[in-house]
Structures are given as C-alpha cells and as structure tokens.
Image (spheres, rainbow, N blue to C red):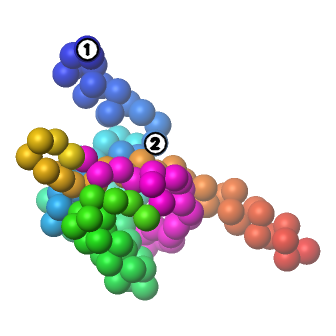
Amino acid sequence: MIDETIARAIVEQMAEALIFATVDGKIALWNRGASLLFGFERDEAIGQSLDLIIPPHLRNAHWSGFDAAIETGRLKLNGKPTLTRALHKTGRKLYVEMSFALIETDQGILGSVAVARDVTEKVERERAGAIR
C-alpha cells in the first residue's frame, strides 16, 4: 500500500493536469500540472466551478454530461480520452485531451476526476497541414 505522502507527491508532481470536482462541480483538487496548463494557481481554482476552464459555448453540454454521470454512475466514454476545448486564465482557448473517472466510495459518488494534457500545438499543426 502506498502511503499518503507518496500519493500526494505523485498527484502534485505528475506532468498532466489533475482536477477533482465534487458532485456539485466545484474544484476540490488542482495539481501543479493544472496550474501550468490552465494558468490558475491552486488557491484561485479551489472552490470555483469547473466553468473556470470550460468555454461558455460548451458549458451546457458539459453540465448535461456531468450531471448524468453523477446521477447514473456511468461515463459516456468509459474513461477513454477525448479531445475538447478549454480556457486558459488569459482567455486563450486550448485544445486538451482529457479522460474522466467517477470517484466512488461506500458513501456513494463523491465527484469526478479529470486528467488533461495540452495538445493545442499538435491539433493546430495537423489542421494547418490539412488546409494546404
């Protein structure tokens, strides 16, 4: 069994963004990778709605899927990574690859965790090549 100190170090030091949101969509865990990817420091993100990083035009779809997952205990993509858009603190739009999992204990579903990585350069490069 991994002790709590090692588990915390892994979460904090992993390169990918790791975000845990409670069932009401409030950010409860935000690692260093999330700060680097989205531009918000931990204290700016904790307690905020996930809308902090979701572009306005995607919010209705996000919340529909989020609420359905919390209610049913099932994810639409079953944890497979998906390409989506996200917002940086500066307002710049990012392409991110994200995977999601529901966090459940004997007390029920506690929330959702997402792991994200920036794929903006890759997507823009591929799209520029397709235009030629």
Q: Over which residues does the magenta segment extend?
A: 77-103
Q: Residue furthest right?
A: 132
- Write down the residue under mark 2: 16
Horizontal side, residue 44 vs residue 76: left or right = left
At which x and y percent is residue 20? 26, 50
Q: Secondary structure at mark 1?
A: loop
| CB contact under 8 Å: marks 1 and 2 | no
Horizontal side, residue 2 vs residue 47: left or right = right
Q: CA distance from mark 1 to mark 2?
A: 23 Å
**On-image quarter of the C terminus:** bottom right
* Residue that appears at 48% across and 60% down: 77
- Write down the residue under mark 1: 1
The quadrant holding residue 62 is: bottom left
Residue 84 is one of the magenta-drawn residues: yes
Q: Secondary structure at mark 2?
A: loop
* Amino acid type of the residue tagged 2 in the rendering: Glu
* Amino acid type of the residue tagged 1 in the rendering: Met
At which x and y percent is residue 128? 80, 70
